[in-house]
Amino acid sequence: MEIIQKALIELVRSRKKLTGLLPRLKENKQISAKEEMKTFVFDLQDYSDALTVVTDFAEADFAEESDSVTPQEISQLFSEQRQELQTLVSEFTQLADQMETGESTEGFHGLNAGSIRRMAGSLQGLIEMNGQLLQENLNFQRFIKDVSISEAIPTEEVVEEKTGFFKKLFGK
């Protein structure tokens, strides 16, 4: 169970990083102008949402703020997530086997062996999606490099102070 919790916490952290990058990618006009890149960003969103299948089980007291990743760090993030997902599939399969043979009565958040197997199957699908996104990421990285949009993706939102009517009128 400890291995499962550690893997879940790492997945939650990496999901938060990915989720922090998505709004900046969606707002970028150069990415939005190209259909293939826009599809990649939407696929990233779907993948991030799909990770909640298992990250919702992470402990609720985990509220650490994570920085989002840069577009160039997406490959590394996918690799880390793939490792954690494979660990979870392995651990869930082992736990389900132990529950079916009676070696373990301890379930995962009250789930029975069949539910744990279904979750492992869902995670296997996420591993496949991770691999496909990793391949698509190569084109995305080429696009970023060719157009050099990494500078155009804002790292923070800059909010300009609105000038009031009287300031405009009196110029103060």
Image: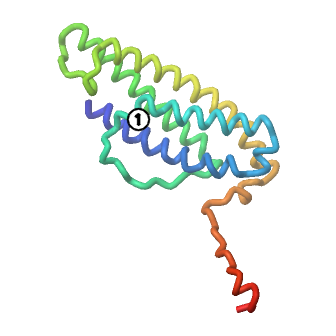
Residue 102 as seen in the image, left or right of residue 168:
left
Q: Badge 1, how many Cα within 10 Å: few under 14, some, many 20+?
A: some
Left or right, 95 with reference to 36: left
Look at 76% across and 42% down and name the residue there: 142
Across and down, in percent, residue 163 comes to 69, 79
Which is more toward the observer, 68 or 6? 68
For the rendered model, the colour scheme is rainbow
* Percent position of residue 18, x then y: 55, 44
Instruction: Read off the residue under disc 1.
Output: 55
In this rendering, position of residue 43 left or right of residue 53: right
At 41% from the left edge and 30% from the top edge, which residue is drawn?
Answer: 54
Residue 6 location, quadrant: top left
Look at 79% across and 36% down and name the residue there. 35
Vertical comparison of 50 with 64: above or below: above
Give the answer, above or below, for where 169 lies relative to 136: below
Q: Residue furthest top?
A: 101
Q: In what element is the residue under mark 1?
A: helix
Q: Is residue 156 above or below residue 50?
A: below
Identify the image quadrant of residue 55.
top left
> Left or right: where does residue 42 sit relative to residue 47?
right
Of 170 and 69, which appears nearest the observer? Answer: 170
Residue in view at x 41 percent, y 19 percent: 120
Considering the image in quadrants, where does the C terminus appear? bottom right
Amino acid of disc 1: Thr
